[in-house]
Image: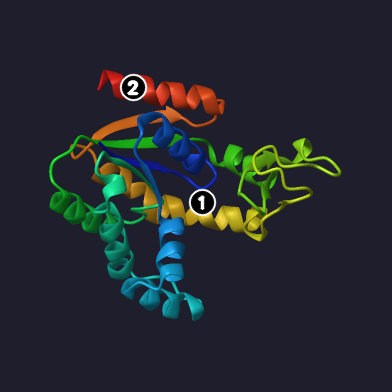
């Protein structure tokens, strides 16, 4: 089973990817996480990526693709995986198709979470993130002397710098211009499932699994 989870920034892709990976007993492959892991482990591609990141530049598709190829060939992905954060462009989609072809035939799903831009902006500007474990909560849920319900850290919730409204608007503009066309690329290449991402986390998960079962 090969799953690509797709949608605009802040729509809940990471949250759903973790839940689905657990429920389906497959690997959750976050491109941000595997890039940091490759750099930390000083792999050949990781060292190349680090030199680029240290100069404040984006990691080129060929290096990122190589890192993804290496991870998807690991034993943890043999029963399937959910890919979170890649592909973000048509060029990356073509690269991913080449990688998946190397892995062999498997049922492929594209899950797209939908939400209006205004809802996304409101959601992101009102969220806080645990600096220790990355758990996300709504701002009014975080009180004085607050303990993270996940990792139990005290007073660890912060507001990300890139959760500023103007930054979010720019990220959404990039998404609509360069990432959204990837969705059409997968028509006919995968089982495409569109879900209303504004529902509760549990409702989104249930709807995704129901649709996958019927596909």
Residue drawn at (33%, 30%) of the image: 193
Q: Is residue 128 rendered to the left or right of residue 14?
A: right
* Rendered residue at 20%/55% (across/down): 99
Residue at 36% of width from left, 19% of height from top?
A: 210
Q: Quadrant of the C terminus?
A: top left
User: In the picture provided, is 198 more to the left or to the right than 138?
Assistant: left
Q: Is residue 86 left or right of residue 163?
A: left
Residue 129 location (% of width, % of height): 66, 48
Write down the residue under mark 1: 172
- Residue at horizontal 27 percent and vertical 60 percent from the top: 70
> Could you tell me residue 183's position as x and y percent?
32, 43
Residue 158 to residue 13: above or below: below
Element type where label 2 sits in the image: helix
Numbered circles on residues, count? 2
**Callout 1 crowding tier (Cα within 10 Å): few <14, some 14–19, many ≥20:** many
Q: Where the N terminus falls, by quadrant?
A: top left
Q: Residues within 10 Å of mark 2 (few under 14, many from 20)?
A: some
Residue 68, horizontal then vertical, whole percent? 31, 58
Q: CA distance from mark 1 to mark 2?
A: 27 Å
- The residue wearing badge 2 is 211
Image x and y of residue 45, in percent: 33, 72
Q: Secondary structure at mark 1?
A: helix
- Between disc 1 and disc 2, the foreground one is 2
In the displayed structure image, the side of residue 3 where residue 19 appears, left or right: right
121 to 198, vertically: above or below: below
């Amino acid at each position: 089973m090969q799953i690509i989870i797709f949608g605009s920034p802040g729509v809940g892709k990471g949250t759903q990817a973790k839940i689905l990976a657990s429920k389906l007993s497959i690997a959750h492959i976050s491109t941000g996480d595997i890039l940091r892991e490759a750099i930390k482990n000083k792999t050949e591609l990781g060292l190349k990526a680090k030199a680029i990141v240290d100069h404040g530049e984006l990691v080129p598709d060929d290096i990122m693709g190589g890192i993804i190829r290496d991870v998807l060939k690991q034993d943890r992905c043999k029963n399937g995986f959910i890919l979170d954060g890649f592909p973000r462009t048509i060029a990356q989609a073509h690269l991913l198709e080449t990688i998946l072809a190397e892995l062999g035939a498997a049922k492929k799903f594209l899950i797209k979470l939908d939400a209006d831009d205004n809802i996304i902006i409101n959601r992101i500007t009102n969220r806080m993130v645990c600096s220790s474990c990355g758990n996300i909560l709504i701002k009014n849920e975080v009180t004085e002397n607050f303990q993270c319900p996940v990792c139990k850290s005290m007073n660890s919730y912060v507001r990300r710098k890139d959760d500023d409204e103007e930054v979010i608007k720019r990220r959404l503009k990039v998404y609509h211009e360069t990432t959204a066309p990837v969705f059409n690329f997968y028509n006919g290449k995968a089982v495409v499932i569109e879900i209303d991402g504004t529902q509760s986390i549990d409702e989104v998960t249930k709807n995704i699994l129901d649709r996958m079962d019927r596909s």
